[in-house]
Image (cartoon, rainbow, N blue to C red):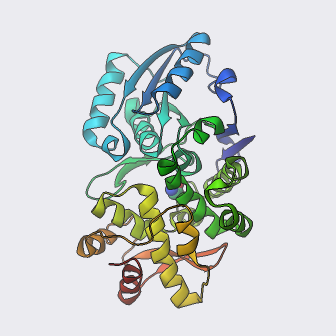
Amino acid sequence: MVTKVTNESGATVSTIEVGRGLVADFVLPGNPRRTKVAVLTQPGAQQVALAYVDRLQELGLETHSMVLPDREEAKTWEVVAKAHGWLAEIRLTRSDTVLGVGGGSLTDVAGFVAATWLRGVEVAHIPTTLLGAVDAAVGGKTGINLAGKNLVGAFCHPTSVTIDLDVLDAVPLNIQREGWAEVYKTALIADPDLLELLHDSGPLTPLDDVVERVVRFKAEVVSEDFREFGRRAVLNFGHTIGHAVEFASGCSHGEAVAVGIVAAVAISRDRYGFDTNVREGLAVFALPTTTNADAARVSELLLLDKKNDADGVRMVLLQGVGDPIVDHVTDDEIELALRSVGL
Ligand code: GLY
């Protein structure tokens, strides 16, 4: 199945393929001037990267590979500078392509490296985790961390995203559950039927029933609002407090999003009477619903969230399943939300 992300003129900017056994027929989008592909990958994804390198060589392309550090360790200036130095050595030109093969952190940083090399070269992604597939690799947000999560970055669409469910099925459960947090988020903001399916089948829900519909929703939102001037902000449901918890505690992104969902639901329940039991729903995926992060640090980090404006902290809340709203929250509401996750 192929989903397209379009720009405001309706032109396709990103093609997302979801399927099985995709490496055999893999091709990059047409570009007769491309001669080289710089593959950025990470520990744990190297086998998959190797298969794509073989395929690219079969297609007559020169390939070079670099292994970046794992997870959030990759999202630093030092790593970006190293990757740029390497692109200079291999003389990657504006006609060439960066291919990111890995999880969400890897595609975030690969996208940023590509967006800033020679003022922007083509990037394509092969996500190797559920989290990468349903969120990070799709939609063109790239970035690295500074005093807060993703504070430096660029919007830059990957020209293609290849999501191979055979690759995702092989991911260990403790990593897979991180992706389930993003799937659960999408179900809450957009898809009551998917939420029912997740509540019925938990982590046994077949990826064939999940990935395509989550990706299709994200592609629709991003096509409408690439730079997050409006609707795209709903994709950050659970991420305001989630990002602060992640940065303060060093827990994984998926765990932090799960905690962030519980916190945002506490305000939604208080304000709008939202009544879905998300604690139970998330626990089925072995996702945490409380945190032992430092409360003062979390509060401090909340002030750095990118959705904030001069009037204060803005969060995505739920008036009902599939009915998100972005609004300012009061200090009392933040306190209520933090208390609900043990802070
Ligand atoms: N991860 C949220 C977004 O791509 O907008």
Q: Residue at coordinates 42% horizontally, 68% vertically from top-left?
A: 240
Q: In this view, does 165 lie to the left or right of 129?
A: right
Residue 221, position as x, y percentages in the image: 64, 58
Q: Judge whether 12 appears above or below 228 on screen.
A: above
Q: Can residue 307 be seen in this view?
A: no
Residue 212, position as x, y percentages in the image: 70, 48
Give the quadrant of the C terminus.
bottom left
Residue 66, position as x, y percentages in the image: 38, 25
Give the quadrant of the N terminus.
top right
Q: In this view, does 153 lie to the left or right of 34?
A: left
Q: Judge whether 53 appears above or below 174 on screen.
A: above
Residue 263, position as x, y percentages in the image: 45, 76
Q: Judge whether 268 appears above or below 298 on screen.
A: below
**Number of dots carrying numbers:** 0
Q: Residue at coordinates 52% horizontally, 14% vertically from top-left?
A: 35
| Nearest to the observer: residue 221 or residue 172 | 172
Q: Residue at coordinates 43% horizontally, 31% vertically from top-left?
A: 41
Q: In this view, does 236 lie to the left or right of 66?
A: right
Q: Is residue 199 visible?
A: yes
| Nearest to the observer: residue 160 or residue 177 | 177
Give the image quarter of residue 291: bottom left
